[in-house]
Image (cartoon, rainbow, N blue to C red):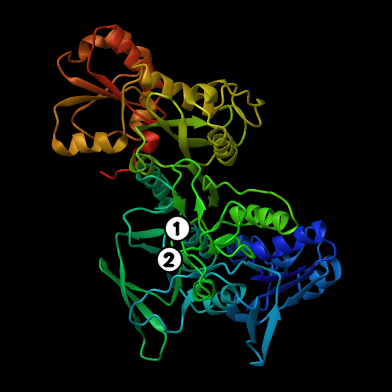
Amino acid sequence: MRVLIIGAGAGGPKVAARLRRLAPEAEITMVDRGRIISHAGCGMPFYVAGTVKDFGQLLQTPYGVTRDEAYFAGEKGVRVLTRTEAVGLDRARKEVNLANLDTGERLTLPYDRLVLATGARPFALPVEGADLAGIHFFHRPEEVQGLLTDLGEASEVVVVGAGLIGLEVAEALTHHPVFVTVVEQKEQILPALLDPDMARVLQARLEEKGLDFRLGARVVRFEGNGEGRVARVVTEAGTLDADLVVVAAGVRPNVELARAAGLTVGVTGALEVTERMQTNDPDIYAVGDCVETTHLVSGRKVYAPLASIASRQARVAADNLAGGEARFRGALVTAVARLFEYSVGRTGLGLEEALGAGFNAAATLVTALDRPAYYPGQGLILLKLVTEEGTGRILGGQAVGAGEVVKRVDVLATLIRMGGTVADLAEVDLGYSPPFSTPLDALHHLANTAANKRAGLARTLTAAELRAKIDRGDDFVILDVRTPAQSEAKPFKDPRVVVIPLGELRARLDELPRNKEIVVVCPQGLRSYEAQCTLRGAGFEEVRFLEGGLNTWVYKE
């Protein structure tokens, strides 16, 4: 069997390696237009930051051997052609036309089975000045190395795009003596990852670290310095000086070769494939960033260019190329990242996504410590749970914080995959030891709070809802139940505020009006819930508390 693989990023090499183990006699050829293959692209921001000292580490196996043509030929028995681009696909003759990008030499290779792992291309802004020197993409190794070379003379850097890559690049650049501004045309950071309330909290933390954000600011054009180099970024919201620009405005699936050959492109603009990773031509498979997938919660087609998904798809394709019956049924689009000392992650659907998909959905926010307060290194995390009303089914989860976030996201992803509910989350048997968690994990608090809300025990409002009440001038009371030291250190500045520490509340109930709504605030929400229970038990009817606590209050005075 002759197997030809187009693309040697994440998916292609995985197909080749797995297929070689399953089909020792197969003739496997892999081609890629780049010179560097099978590199750890997700590690490139850490190379820019200096966390990874040697770029060669991103090209090596776990045992220190460089993944190059010689490695694939010697250890895998796979022929690799670099700097070689597929320029034509003849499905009837089962041939691919190739061109060497250095010599111009043309070559035609036959195949019995073809795997398209052509990946994605960075989105180039269709604006004036986009071809000026000093404007870089962050996609291929050569581009990243060129960015670092160019960085030496810069002092003002603009990153276009506040998605995962844009923010990882922005953070990496802060390890250099430059001022970094992030421009995003949408009104929030990480628009494809987080709901707006979670994004606002993370944005506030990143601003404390020195990042400057210009949101809702579409780039209109780039202006030069008269010598062919970028000097300014002009947006709808104003002009920014820039010695260097990094465009990280997302990627688009690389499907031109496939489209020209008559392969079906799906509703997302990526290739449509079966669960076996086959295109509409059963002899042609496709994996990775050039294909669309099914969201396991909504059932809708989504485009999710993530290395984790590409690697699992590649294994499925290889199994089926070798005669197996593997299936890739879809993904929850689980994604995590670390920005400075903060971690962020999501899985499943956000609240607006769930509502848009037709679910009767609700959300719960909780702020909790990832480990006991007495244990060194503990940190706060903000968790969000999206559930289906009535059934209690978990639809999605998000997390932001300085504490351990990723394991909580992974637990939620597992439960969602298994059709888990809020009750399941409350009962899941998680490991406990002070270096790792609290006796009742933050996830248990999240589930219990969601259950309390459904039962009517916990009545809440979000930070955005409280802000709207304040801006409207509503007549209500904000009850601050923090300790005196906490309230004095960071006072909640509003004429409606009444400060009564929780320990004094029962003795001072007469200081509160019974004919007004009371909104209780505290750092994390726990004391506010206690206060709500106390007040309702004393006959106060209109009482709510700030969900997630003041940890979610990022509004400036």
Q: Position of residue 336 (x, y in %)?
A: 54, 48
| Residue at far front of view | 92
* Residue 341 in sight from this viewpoint: no
Could you tell me which secondary element the residue under label 1 belongs to? loop
Residue at 59% x, 66% y: name it. 48
How many discs appear? 2
Cα gap from disc 1 to disc 2, whole angstroms: 7 Å
Residue at 30% x, 7% y: name it. 537
Residue closer to the observer: 203 or 310: 310
In the image, residue 438 above or below residue 327: above
Q: Are marks 1 and 2 in contact (CB under 8 Å)?
A: yes
Residue closer to the observer: 64 or 478: 64
In the image, residue 225 above or below residue 286: below
In the image, residue 105 above or below residue 389: below
How packed is label 1: few (under 14 Cα within 10 Å), some, or many (20 or more)?
A: many
How packed is label 2: few (under 14 Cα within 10 Å), some, or many (20 or more)?
A: many
**In screen coordinates, is 181 left or right of 282?**
left
Please give the residue where the numbered disc 2 appears in the rendered image. 249
Q: Amino acid at mark 2?
A: Ala
In the image, residue 221 above or below residue 391: below
Residue at 57% x, 67% y: name it. 119
The image quadrant that residue 440 belongs to is: top right
Q: Position of residue 554 (x, y in %)?
A: 34, 42
**In screen coordinates, is 555 left or right of 44?**
left
Residue closer to the observer: 387 or 468: 387
Q: Position of residue 95 (x, y in %)?
A: 65, 78
Q: Position of residue 193 (x, y in %)?
A: 45, 49
First in sequence: mark 1 vs mark 2: 1
Please give the residue where the numbered disc 1 appears in the rendered image. 163
The quadrant the C terminus occupies is top left
Q: Amino acid at mark 1?
A: Gly
The image quadrant that residue 21 belongs to is: bottom right
